[in-house]
Amino acid sequence: MRKTLALFSLSLGIAFVNPVSSIVAQVTIPQQVPVPSTPEVLPPLQPITPEAACNSQNCLGWDEQLWGGNGDRQALLTSIDNSLRYLGTNKAATAYANYQIKEITLDRVRRSLLRFRELVVSSTSAAELQAAVHREFAFYQSIGNDGKGTVKFTAYYEPVYTASRVRTSVYKYPLYRVPSDFKEWAKPHPKRVDLEGKNGLLGNKSRLRGLEMLWFRDRMDAYMIHIQGSAQIRLTNGQRTSVGFAGGTDYPWTSIGGQLAKDGKLPLSGLTMPKLISYFRKHPKELSNYLPRWERFVFFQETNGTAATGSISVPVTAERSIATDKSLMPPGALALINNSFPYPAGGGRLESRRVSRFVLDQDTGSAIKGPGRVDYFMGTGKLAGDRAGITGGNGSLYYLLLKE
């Protein structure tokens, strides 16, 4: 803007200094003032050609993990059925009525899932399913974070923790229910430190007093549930339950690992969740310095042992559900991802393997913003957590819709 104003002022100066020459020359062409150009905003998804979807180097849609002794075809079918249930709701109708890519409609997404389900049931190999998909489906690629399709992947999971229904000298870090008047809270909302204190033990001085639902012995346990959004709970009385997201204050995601790296406490390169947790185990006092930097506070509801539920109100399925930015991506739709994920390799080791997997877009997250982000649901328990904690890297994301 300043450059445009400077050019405009300069042109006025020349006109005033030399008005005679302008008259003599009888210049009738009006002076052109540069107009700032508005960058073109690309739709988050772009259709790709059949040649791009299948060429001599690569052919999309090879998901060999559906077959074999450890195949998870039933998990994919379950995830499809969950999406189909969502697509029959008023919530889905509202979402697709306003979806920015007009050819991606609720009816087309639903028909695509029904036909794909038939193909998964009838196909006997990865090659057979892949060939059928290329005959009948069009591919829409996410433009990614660079406009060229580069998508950053992370993974999340459902942890399993032990908790008490009553506060004790050991179990003293609470998880809170959503306040009944939360929708009336003035903005800006209170920050994390205002609601639980620097040490997480604000207790009776907190405006959340009386909303405690469970108590944990380790502050990181409660904090990890805030990050993951749900958890399975082993109660100290021998019973089991679960908790799920019920609301959160209006603050953006802040990476605590990024904050540690910024302060020179840990190297950013190769920083994983296990390394982050290990750091706090060795330096517990640092929890009070770093956990409040994520200002958002999350509230929960008890879900009585039910499976983790995504943002479209259906259960998420281990390794067949993803979270994306729902202001951009089609909820409940069939997608195909390509990325490297860690897999058990024996002896407690994990090794990275690049795979393609058909997935359903069923969740979102406060850190999942823009067309270049995917969070992959790894499942429940310690192994899922170990795998999720070291998942990363760049891959690609496609949505599949029946050809029209």
Image (cartoon, rainbow, N blue to C red):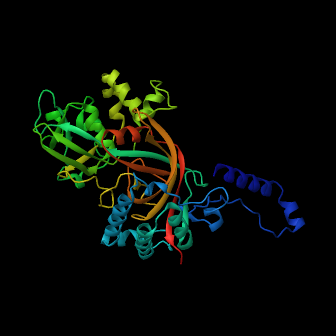
* Identity of the residue drawn at 36% across and 30% down: 277
Name of the residue lying farthest toward the bottom: 404
Where is 25 relative to 372, above or below? Answer: below
The quadrant in which residue 314 appears is bottom left
Left or right, 391 with reference to 59:
left
Q: Is residue 373 visible?
A: yes
Left or right, 327 with reference to 196:
right
The quadrant in which residue 39 appears is bottom right
Name of the residue lying farthest toward the right: 24
Residue 304 place in picture, x, y as percent: 17, 51
Q: Is residue 296 visible?
A: no
Residue 368 place in picture, x, y as percent: 43, 50
Where is 133 relative to 338, above or below? Answer: below
Instruction: Judge by depth and name the residue closer to the eye, 241 or 331.
Output: 241
Instruction: Judge by depth and name the residue closer to the eye, 199 or 85.
Output: 85
Residue 206 place in picture, x, y as percent: 18, 37
* Identity of the residue drawn at 25% across and 37% down: 222
Left or right, 56 with reference to 136:
right
* Identity of the residue drawn at 16% across and 31% down: 171
Where is 150 relative to 272, above or below? Answer: below
Instruction: Judge by depth and name the residue closer to the eye, 250 or 282.
Output: 282
